[in-house]
Amino acid sequence: MKKYLILSILIVTAFVGCDLIDGTNVTNPDLTLDEAVEQPNSATAWLNGLDRRTSFVYNAFLTTAELTTDNYENKATFFNQNVDNGTFRDIDTDINASQLQMGRLREQAQFGLTDVLENDPDAAGTEIEAEMYFFLGWAHIMSGETFVALPAEGGGEPQTPETHFQAAINAFTAANAISPSISYDMGLARAHYNLGNRTEAVQFAEAVLNADPNFIREARYDGVNGPTNEFQNAVYDRQSFNDLQPLPRLDFLDPKYGDLGGTNESPVIMQSAEEAHLIIAEAQLTDGVAGLANAQQTMLNLLALVDTRPVRDFDETEEGRTGTAGTETRPNSSDFVVASEPGEPFIEDLVLDRTASTTVSTVSGTSVTQADINALTDETEALRTLYLMRQEVFFGEGRRMFDLGVQWPVSEVEALNNENVTDQHRQPFIPAYMPTPYGTINDFTVDGTEVTIAIDMNRVIAEERGNRFN
């Protein structure tokens, strides 16, 4: 059977758990996959397809991942209406699409390393091959952080997150052996962090900061040729139809991705030097009193980096945060002050005036101040502050779900096509420390201009889940 391909992006559209090639959307029926691979510079073209595929991965999972957490609540949109309340169904199309796109990225990267490079030997042993390993590792990172389990090969048995993280380590290590890169070091730091490997996580995080203290890598979008940024559409482009409510504690970070003018689309942050600081600080917090002091300094270093990151003015005059009958007021001006939970002090400047010049950080931001960091006196409170910084820095990047410990189920489509999927794989994982009802993570009350969040999930993580390196 012929396997057809869109030549412009050279994508393999293999499904996550099977070896089938999707022959839909073919634009050049005269070109087979084998013929495409044999084209001059096919590895370069294939790598461009991997870069583009990564943008599709973020389009598939990012909005639903953010709604799964306390970052955003779906007030009234066509986006997933279930996940806000902790209902993660294997039949939901966005959960299936997320799994599908992650699997496509993995299969496409693997095919590039085996078949494409074999036909383009000049690319072997170069940065092109290293980047293919990077995208293979990235597919495993995202699979492990998002799902209870996923196959690591077509038709294979669903693998645990730990197995995916180790596969990511193997891929990033292979990439570094070919052409060392800060990005691969950052990938290694993240994978080791996810596994709780303190020594290795810190080693690679420090390597990132030593090489480039301002490092950043993004998933890119194209307003003309596509794909466009679906999360930008969700939180900005819909304007008066935008009913994705950020937690008032995080209002000052919304929208992280907005209109850049013309046909430009906001990129999504994949990696940044901020993560290296956060990993190092969390590791230091396991070292007692001396560790607390070191962690405070690392957090101050992070604060200094965040202060250098760009901000941008977005026109939010049509945001339309007026609330609806029977629901709580949606804070929409700087008159509001916010407490992270009952009994905590109210903080100013967390809610923005929605005007033609609403200023928002486009890489990272935080409400934590130097005074907040200097006032820390014990590990638990420091960890609570650190997780607040993680939440704020990674806002809009799909990272919060992993910190909460929530995992989506394997999709029904996968189960119907892969006999290795069990009923257990089709169940989500929600940690026991998550509140009941789950939707409490989005709740807040408003008394005049005073907003009180129902529960501070950063305190819950610090007290119940604890340090990743413990």
Image: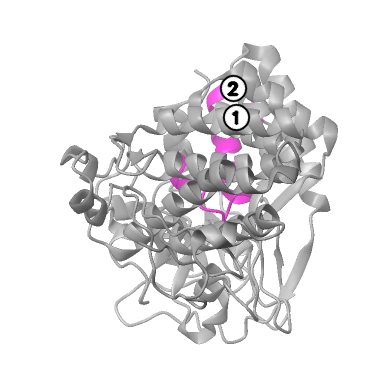
Residue 164 falls in image quadrant: top left
Percent x, y of residue 215? 78, 45
Q: Residue at x 32, y 82 (%)?
A: 325
Residue 364 visible: no
**Disc number at residue 112?**
none
Front one among 100 and 385: 100
Classified by dominant secondary structure, the portion drawn in magenta counts as: helix
Percent x, y of residue 228? 58, 74
From this view, report whether residue 437 is shown above or below residue 8.
Answer: above
249 displayed left or right of 277: left
Residue 366 visible: yes
Front one among 203 and 11: 11
The secondary structure type at the circle numbered 1 is helix
Q: Residue at x 45, y 41 (%)?
A: 145
Q: Amino acid at mark 1?
A: Ala
Residue 256 falls in image quadrant: bottom right
Residue holding disc 1: 382
Q: Amino acid at mark 2?
A: Asp
How many neighbours does mark 1 have within 10 angstroms: few (below 14), some (14-19), or many (20 or more)?
Answer: many
Residue holding disc 2: 378
Q: Is residue 382 magenta?
A: yes
Front one among 298 and 336: 298
Q: Is residue 285 magenta?
A: no
Q: CA distance from mark 2 to mark 1?
A: 6 Å
From this view, report whether residue 340 is shown above or below residue 152.
Answer: below
Q: Which residues are magenta?
A: 376-402
**What is the count of numbered marks?**
2
Q: Are marks 2 and 1 in contact (CB under 8 Å)?
A: yes
Percent x, y of residue 219? 64, 58
The N terminus sits in image quarter: bottom left
Q: Residue at x 79, y 36 (%)?
A: 301
Residue most toward the left? 423
